[in-house]
Amino acid sequence: MSAIAQSESMPKTMRAVVCHGPKDYRLEEVTTPQADAGEVVIKLQACGVCASDMKCYTGAPLFWGDAHRKPYVDGPVIAGHEFIGEVVQLGEGAGEKYGLELGDTAISEQIVPCWNCRYCRTGKYWLCQVHNIYGFQHVVHGGMAEYMKFPARSLVYKVPNEISPANAAMIEPLACSIHAVQRGEIEFGDVVVIAGAGTLGLGMVGAARLKNPGLLISVDLVDYRLEIAKKLGADLTINPSQADAVQEVLDLTEGYGCDVYIEATGHPSAVEQGLRMIRKAGTFVEFSVMREPVTVDWTIIGDTKELNIHGAHLGPHAYPLAIDYVHRGLIDVSQIVTHQLSLEEYIKAFEMVQAAKDSIKVQLVP
């Protein structure tokens, strides 16, 4: 293979949605990336808009900093971390390293580890101290563009070409969902509650179904999302605006509560709900990126119930599983993708995700 393998004439510039600050995202003409040694350039086929993108867009302190934390975003940066694309350029050694050829479909894990920090050196690369995630720091531009580059530090996977771009762009959120379910340590017969039936929560329903729990319950405030949860494997759905979700779960479990509770709403009320709903010595998995700090009664966690509290971050080691489950149709992610819009309609896409009225996963297509 030559130093750089290229499948098409690459334009010098491309369109991209660039984040400059809160509520300051612009469609711009920028330089098209080129692959150096060990790097991959893809031509984007689709890129999802994530709830964390919306929190960044609206100025959440987690991304832009406050009196207690430094800014996480380092822009200007091309947004987007739920992407899929066709390999159009391979730097020297990249094809052999990742098993890729020009024309293949490829994806990279959303984090680009430094491989030098304490976490990377001990195998916990997804907790990398540097923590470069596509679309938030300019050293790793994201996928809301016509082309993007996977740096040599990336974790890259080949995706079967027969998976549609809409479904393939769901691999990143599904990997996160799988990891959260793994953190729940579900056992046969467990009563499992997944709070939130957005993109991540629905993926968790599909993944938890494969664990064959005794009873799988989806909780959400939006009925049409709960209908999709049923299609993905939920045995029972509860809308807290129409019923007392905590009491229903207690009634179903002889007053004990659920064995596993996974929080995927991003709302503080769902944390309190889970603490009241879960049984003693149960497992509580917190996945959401909260806009603001959440205050709860920590006595419940310790003295009252002695809970197992597990965090879940990103989708480590879960991309091959997500690719396989989507490819074989074991988790039908097509049920989750509701809208595809052009790059020019990025503001409309953001507004749809923020409103969350008639959409679940909204994707941008160059």
Image (cartoon, helix red, strand yellow):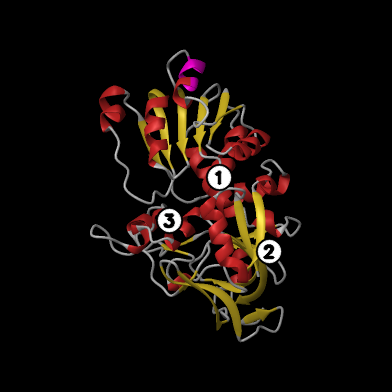
Using residue 31 as the reference point, say whether residue 332 is left or right of it.
Answer: right
SS state under label 2: strand
For the point 38% across and 26% down, the residue is 276
**How far from the left and from the top, in percent, is residue 320?**
60, 51
In this picture, is 168 found above or below 311? below
Q: Quadrant of the C terminus?
A: bottom right
Q: Which residue is mark 1?
A: 198
In this picture, is 289 found above or below 301? below
Disc number for residue 125: 3
Crowding at mark 2 (Cα within 10 Å: few <14, some 14-19, many 20+): many
Tell me which label, 2 or 3, sits earlier in the chain.
2
Nearer mark to the viewer, of 2 and 1: 1
Disc number for residue 59: none
In this picture, is 30 found above or below 124? below
Nearer mark to the viewer, of 3 and 1: 1
Q: What stretch of residues is rendered in magenta?
A: 248-253
Using residue 28 as the reference point, say whether residue 44 is left or right of it.
Answer: right
Q: Is residue 249 magenta?
A: yes
Tell me which label, 3 or 1, sits earlier in the chain.
3
In the figure, residue 169 lies in which quadrant?
bottom right
**How far from the left and from the top, in percent, is residue 361?**
60, 52
Q: Amino acid at mark 3?
A: Tyr
